[in-house]
Image (tube, rainbow, N blue to C red):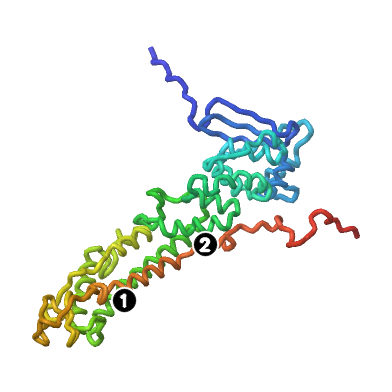
Amino acid sequence: MASPEPPLIASPLIPDRVASMDFDLEGDVLLTLPSTSGIARFRVNSNILCIASPVFRAMLGAKSQFRERAALSARTSTSEPLELSLADDDPNALTVILRIIHLQYDWVPPSLNADQLYTIAVICDKYDMRQSLEVWLVNWISPLVEPSASPVSGDNWLFIAYALGRKDLFRRLTKELILQCRSDEDGNLLMNGNTLSEHIPGHIVAEISARRQQTIKGMNDCLYSIVQEYSAPDTSKCKCTSKQDACDDIALGFLIRTFKRLKIYPEASQIVLQQAIQEFKTLLDGVSFPSNVLFEDGTSKYQCRYCNNHSSANYCYSCHRTAYVVANGTSHANTCSPLLGYKEKIQDLYNSIEGLSYTDFVRVNALATAPPPGVNLWDCLQYK
């Protein structure tokens, strides 16, 4: 006897459950959204979609050359609505958006959390609907960015700032990513170990990556330049009164050994280059020149009042005196440390980092024109 066939199991992507909602009882378009929860079916008005979204207007508008427009034009009063599948859209977020543009305001949530706002922003950006939703977007985002709210940080918030046109927030968060992003072996940016949101436009990610690499290169250039300065045989960097070559020799040896130990000399290792700028700077800030460096006949704790030479003991090897050698209150490390100017350059470079300008990356919607400043928005009719 043949073995029984296994029971049919519904696909996890297209379950057998359906949620239907009519935003317009006479709507001519049926939007379908498959998800792990079921299939959402929204009956909507194509004219409203076209008014609210340039993307839908390009597909369904009167001048569209798409086949969807041809199918709409061929409909009769008894025809079924045109079915459009929006497989990648979040059903809950799209429900809220469709309620807004179909003027069903009583059913719009007055507040959203950050994750919900992110899903709204994804659809808002995909269909270029920011102008249509602006009033609601302001109400939703304002309490989330107040000082008393949870920290606004990370790549999802960067996408929200981009999609919803928040210029200052966009600049601040792009600076944050420039400073805090690491990279993997393939050069992909990572935030907290994860790749950045797939919805952030590629040209924004590329600019963040370029500025990150430029800053790390600048920090490395500071390293190499100071080693070259101390390697020059005909110049002296010694600032103490002894003016000895040994002072520069010790500084150069310290620099090379320290930078090699940190794997940043003669070339920065791949592991170092993959670090975040903040991590790299913290690594460099942790380097300190020994405060107890002593020369046999020329530095440190004591300084002769007669010849100004330094000595490691209460005896001047140049004057051969003991009574006039006094304690020097300034550490030799503070006088001849090779790190002083270098760390200032690193800090200046770090402080010069700025976030990206929103206007350099915004999508321009030619149909969404803002009124000029000072225009009368009430008495605005022009009779001719």
For this view, does 316 lie left or right of residue 147? left
x, y percent for residue 217: 37, 68
Residue drawn where x is 61% and y is 57% of the image? 363
Q: On the image, numbered disc 2 is attached to which residue?
A: 356
Q: Nearer the viewer, residue 112 or 54?
A: 112
Identify the amino acid type marked 1. Ser
Tell me which numbered mark, 1 or 2, is placed earlier along the sequence. Answer: 1
Q: Nearer the viewer, residue 294 or 247?
A: 294
Location of the N terminus (image quadrant): top left
Above or below 60: residue 371: below
Q: Nearer the viewer, residue 161 or 92?
A: 161
Q: Quadrant of residue 247?
A: bottom left
Residue drawn where x is 48% and y is 62% of the image? 207
Identify the amino acid type marked 2. Leu
Sort mark 1 into few (<14), some (14-19) or many (20+) by Cα contacts within 10 Å. few
Label placed on residue 225: 1
Q: Residue furthest front?
A: 323
Element at label 1: helix
Above or below 293: residue 101: above
Location of the C terminus (image quadrant): bottom right
Sort mark 2 into few (<14), some (14-19) or many (20+) by Cα contacts within 10 Å. many
Q: Residue furthest top?
A: 1
Above or below 187: residue 302: below
